[in-house]
Amino acid sequence: MSYPLKIPKSVLVVIHTVMLDVLMIERADFPYFWQSVTGSINAFDEPLLLAAEREVFEETGIIVNTEQISTNVLLDWGHSIEYGIYPQWRYRYASSVKLNTEHWFSLCMPETVDIILEPCEHVSYTWLPYQDAAALCFSESNRNAILQLPGRLDAS
């Protein structure tokens, strides 16, 4: 199967409850690879906030409240990192692309909710206290984002 080449600009969305339980999802194409919601922008002009909303819905079924009148609102951390694309996924990018820029967001839910997974992307999910969720992460950047969650919430 042939895929269109990905743009090396992505979003990471840490979904959590007010009690700091964090949603973790397990990738279908890489067993035991647990992560938060992630995904690349679909077009060079796609706004990051819209990409984050889209990815949350595609990977969890959660509809983000864009009216910002409840706790179910995306928070843009205004933070990004650059990391080396894992070798097993480099085929999805142009051959010259080795780095991705990831932009961090969080989404606070009033409580844990059932998730609707996209089975070709993820096979399982769990809600864990943030320290346990961070420990489960395969990705160091995802782990760091989760560990920063309490401080980010205090600052908002």
Image (tube, rainbow, N blue to C red):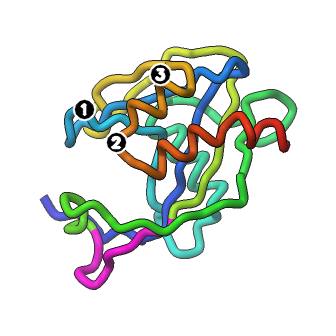
Residue 111: percent from left, percent from top: 66, 15
Residue designated by label 1: 32
Q: Amino acid at mark 3?
A: Ile
Q: For the point 77% across and 37% down, which residue is it?
A: 153
Queried whether the magenta region covers residue 95, the answer comes back as yes
Q: Are marks 3 and 1 in contact (CB under 8 Å)?
A: no
| CA separation in Å, label 2 and label 3 | 21 Å
Q: For the point 17% across and 64% down, which residue is it?
A: 2
Secondary structure beneath disc 2?
loop
Queried whether the magenta region covers residue 69, the answer comes back as no
| CA separation in Å, label 3 and label 1 | 18 Å
Image: magenta residue range: 93-101
Residue designated by label 3: 115
Mark closer to the chain start, 3 or 1: 1
Mark closer to the chain start, 1 or 2: 1
The residue carrying pointer 3 sits among few (fewer than 14), some (14 to 19) or many (20 or more) residues within 10 Å by Cα, namely some
- Residue 138 is labelled as 2
Q: Are marks 1 and 2 in contact (CB under 8 Å)?
A: yes
Q: Amino acid at mark 1?
A: Tyr
Q: Could you tell me which quadrant the C terminus lies in?
A: top right
Residue 121: percent from left, percent from top: 30, 39
Kindly report the secondary structure that dominates the magenta region of the rendered protein: loop
- Residue 63 is labelled as none
Q: For the point 28% across and 79% down, which residue is it?
A: 94
Q: Could you tell me which quadrant the N terminus lies in?
A: bottom left
Q: Are marks 2 and 3 in contact (CB under 8 Å)?
A: no
